[in-house]
Image (cartoon, helix red, strand yellow):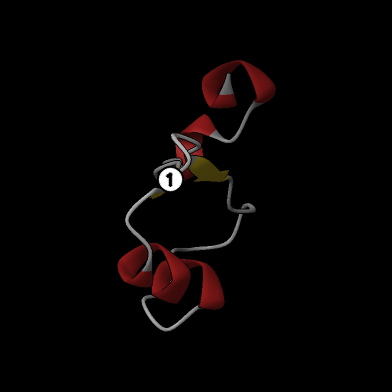
Amino acid sequence: MSDTTVLIVPGLRDHVPAHWQSLLQAKLPKVRSVPPLEHEKLSLAARV
């Protein structure tokens, strides 16, 4: 078994529960998603 964790970095759109990324994260144990940014924090510095 691998200790690898898959990190999903979503785009700038709102989080959608039925999106493939959300479904993949719910189905697999080692998948994590970066939380969506707030609209006033859509900058490179906020993302980093």
Residue at 53% from the left image edge and 21% from the top image edge: 46
| Left or right, residue 32 beside residue 48 | left
Amino acid type at image mark 1: Met
Residue 25 vs 11, above or below: the answer is below
The foreground one among 22 and 43 is 22
Residue 30 at x, y = what percent? 39, 48
Determine whether the residue tagged by mark 1 lies in a helix, strand or loop. Answer: loop
Tell me if mark 1 has few (under 14), some (14-19) or many (20+) residues whose alpha carbon lies within 10 angstroms of its own: few
The foreground one among 30 and 18 is 30
- Residue 38 sits in quarter: top left
Residue at 44% from the left image edge and 34% from the top image edge: 3
Residue at 58% from the left image edge and 36% from the top image edge: 42
Q: Quadrant of the N terminus?
A: top left
| Left or right, residue 25 beside residue 47 | left
Residue at 48% from the left image edge and 44% from the top image edge: 39
Q: Quadrant of the C terminus?
A: top right
Q: Mark 1 — residue?
A: 1
Residue 17 at x, y = what percent? 36, 76
Q: Residue furthest front?
A: 1
Residue 16 vs 3, above or below: the answer is below
